[in-house]
Image (tube, rainbow, N blue to C red):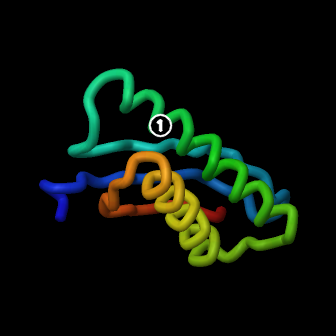
Amino acid sequence: MLAEHGALLVSAGIERSTGKIKSPVTVTPRGWFVGERDKDLVTSAVKEVTQVLEEALKKDVRDSEELNRLARRALGRLVGQRFRRQPVLMSSIVVF
């Protein structure tokens, strides 16, 4: 699976008390595209995941498991629709 589709890691840090993203969303591709398409993927993915996390935080979602699930889901939807690929998705959304 990894050799065929690659992997994407999304991470961010959320401050529980304020519900704000304190460590910005980052997306790291591995075994994916090379060059400009990498940059396009990362830029689009960061925007999409940031938007989804901000919407959840406005609804007072502070559970790290739920935020991780939402981040993976948003990333998977974007990659599937836009790039027609199904990489392994890993998330590390930390609530502190």
Instruction: Classify residue 24 as left or right of residue 34.
Output: right
Asked which quadrant contains residue 71, the reply is bottom right
Q: Secondary structure at mark 1?
A: helix
Residue named by callout 1: 42
Q: Nearer the viewer, residue 92 or 89?
A: 89
- Kind of residue at disc 1: Val
x and y, in percent, of residue 69 in the image: 55, 72
Residue at horizontal 72 percent and vertical 50 percent from the top = 51
x and y, in percent, of residue 24 in the image: 62, 41
Say which quadrant the N terminus sits in: bottom left
Near mark 1 (Cα within 10 A), the count class, few <14, some 14-19 or many ≥20, is some
x and y, in percent, of residue 25 in the image: 58, 45
Q: In the orientation shown, which residue stands out farthest toward the top?
A: 36
Instruction: Classify residue 83 as left or right of residue 81.
Output: left
Instruction: Classify residue 65 as left or right of residue 10.
Output: right
Residue at horizontal 31 percent and vertical 63 percent from the top = 88
Q: Is residue 62 above or below residue 20?
A: below
Q: Nearer the viewer, residue 96 or 4?
A: 4
Q: How many marks?
A: 1
Say which quadrant the C terminus sits in: bottom right
Q: In the orientation shown, which residue stands out farthest toward the left?
A: 3
x and y, in percent, of residue 70 in the image: 61, 68
Instruction: Classify residue 12 as left or right of residue 18.
Output: left
Residue at horizontal 57 percent and vertical 51 percent from the top = 12
Residue at horizontal 33 percent and vertical 55 percent from the top = 85
